[in-house]
Image (tube, rainbow, N blue to C red):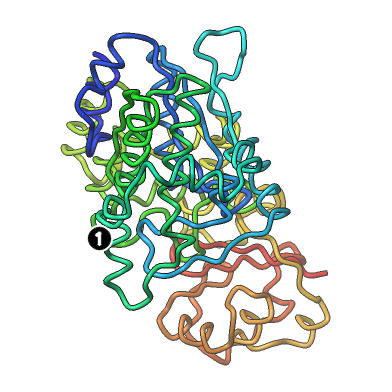
Amino acid sequence: MNLIEELRWRGMIADIMPGTEEQLLKEMTTGYVGFDPTADSLHIGSLVPIILLVHMQKAGHKPVALVGGATGMVGDPSGKSAERNLLDEETLNKNIAGIKRQLEQFLDFDASKPNAALMTNNYDWFKTISFIDFLRDTGKHITVNYMMAKDSVKKRIEGDTGISYTEFAYQLMQGYDFYWLYNNLNCKLQFGGSDQWGNMTTGTELIRRKCAGEAFVFTCPLITKADGGKFGKTESGNVWLDTNRTTPYQFYQFWLNASDADAEKWVPIFTFLNKESIDGLIAEHSLNPASRTLQKTLAKEVTIFVHGEDEYNKAVETTEKLFANTNAPAESLSVEDLENMDGVLKIDFERDKLDAGIDVVSFLAETNIFSSKGEARKMVQGGGVSINRNKVDNLLMPVNSSLLLHGKYLLAQKGKKNYYLIQAI
């Protein structure tokens, strides 16, 4: 099975330019995907392009990860309804360094290998190009009519906010990236999300017009959730790859909580299990959906891929302690159990306030478990808060030292999956 056939059965091909599959069969091909440096960590929305790069390298091709140090200063209108805040150079450099560290976990950069992965930053070539040079040498090759025909531009022009020249020029800059990589690294392929099709084909057009070259693109579908919710978002926000932003336990829980429909769709995309194994998992799961075979396999494979086996084992251990015996009183948890729960947010709280006693709503707000008393009150009324595994049903319930586990801890729960360990200090 060749690379494109592999990606097709996994559901990772949306649009593909004619000749792409033939190019990949003909020779070792250099292909790239771009990463937007809007933060110093990637989130799980970036996992698909990362996995595409890994598949490419496994198939014997040469992957290039381009970090948009220059285009990150401009902003991409694709999929956006309003102008994006632009980042300063210092912030961009910090973000780029963080992204590079993460990409090195997944790809083989051993320069002795012919298909060693490469990282590039488009600021390295844009910083030496003057505005006049760019207009003269690049802008003249792409018509305004061609650029305005792109969906990402049309939607913004027809919308209420319009589009600035800065963002309008983004597709030309991304097109130039492809042209530069084609000329300097013999890069003949670009891939990314389906919302990038317009920007990517501008690159192939620029290569054709400027140097009579031939280049190719394919896109993968944007990941969606069966319930219509946004993929990669939780109550706490984005699910990040950085353990300081999203703990391995929280990361594991995201995948474990996938619906049956989402898990069946995501297992081929986010794991490297073969078709026979995945078909077997789906069949096994259908016989006993309550076993959550698909979700457990998905969570295991993705957590090991991103965080390693040790962190996966810790996430499973924490999950078992928190959920396997929820009917058991919190007092049955040892000090070691409480202190070693990875992924449970730990909060210090003044012992004096607990000695004096504090109402539960104020306690939840002052520990920042909720951002306000109003939010805490609403969740308590809805039955979504527990202290030491006991549901809170009284807005005036006192939280005091008598509730401390082992004279030191309180275990709070918000919703189904958010746990907090409060330590009296």
Give the crowd class for mark 1: few <14, some 14-19, many >=20 residues within 10 Å. few
Left/right of residue 32 with respect to residue 120 in the rendered view: left
Q: Which residue is label 1 attached to?
A: 227
Residue at 52% across / 72% down in the picture? Answer: 386
Left/right of residue 8 with respect to residue 68 in the rendered view: left
Left/right of residue 194 with respect to residue 313 in the rendered view: left
**Is residue 297 visible to us here?**
no
Left/right of residue 153 with respect to residue 57 in the rendered view: left
- Residue 46, image x, y percentages: 46, 43
Query: 294 and 245: which one is in front?
Result: 245
Residue at 71% across / 70% down in the picture? Answer: 404
Vertical order, 2 against 290 (above or below): above
- Residue 358, image x, y percentages: 69, 87
Query: 78 and 213: which one is in front?
Result: 213
Q: How many marks?
A: 1
Residue type, numbered disc 1: Asp
- Secondary structure beneath disc 1? loop
Residue at 26% across / 15% down in the picture? Answer: 2
Query: 125 and 371: which one is in front?
Result: 125
Quarter holding the N terminus is top left
**Is residue 354 visible to us here?**
yes
Vertical order, 124 against 22 (above or below): below
Residue at the farthest bottom position: 396
- Residue 118, image x, y percentages: 56, 24
- Residue 52, image x, y percentages: 39, 30
Quarter holding the C terminus is bottom right
